[in-house]
Amino acid sequence: MNRLLLLVILCVALAVLRAVVITLVLLVVLTLLTAFIMRPRQTLVFLGTFALSALTVAQPVACIVAMVTVAVVVVLTRRRRKLAQQHHLVGID
């Protein structure tokens, strides 16, 4: 009888814990949705930083590859903008 009572108590405790975890997950999702609506750029930067830090812990080589890729894209984008502005100022189309 004691084992059955212990099993029931453990099941109830796990059910309560599951409900709390589901509630916390929903709260985090709603908070991120609200933040994305209010400040989309800052929210995307936060999510990117969070993903990059998780990637750093899990896969350091993949993190280095991702950072190099982002750096190359930023450099190429700036160079392309600068060339476009120079062509626009000179009048070359």
Image: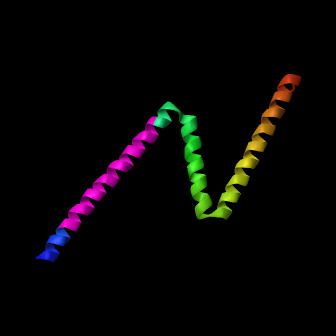
Coloring applied to the structure: rainbow
Q: Main secondary structure of the magenta part?
A: helix
Seen in the picture, residue 51 relative to 83 is either above or below; the reply is below
User: In what quadrant of the picture does the C terminus appear?
Assistant: top right
User: In what quadrant of the picture does the N terminus appear?
Assistant: bottom left
Seen in the picture, residue 70 relative to 40 is either above or below; the reply is below
- Residue at x-position 48% and y-position 33%: 37
- What x and y, as percent, mark residue 5? 14, 71
Q: Nearer the viewer, residue 84 or 2?
A: 2
- What x and y, as percent, mark residue 71? 74, 48
Farthest residue, direction right: 90
Farthest residue, direction front: 2
- What x and y, as percent, mark residue 23? 32, 49
Q: Nearer the viewer, residue 14 or 40?
A: 14
- What x and y, as percent, mark residue 25? 38, 50
- Residue at x-position 44% and y-position 39%: 33
Q: How many marks?
A: 0
- Residue at x-position 49% and y-position 31%: 38
- Residue 8 appears left or right of 71: left
Residue 11 falls inside the magenta stretch? yes
Residue 30 falls inside the magenta stretch? yes
Q: Is residue 93 visible?
A: no
- Residue 79 appears left or right of 9: right
Magenta stretch in the rendered image: 9-34
- Residue at x-position 42% and y-position 40%: 31
- Residue 90 appears left or right of 23: right
Q: Is residue 32 visible?
A: yes
Q: Nearer the viewer, residue 50 or 73?
A: 50
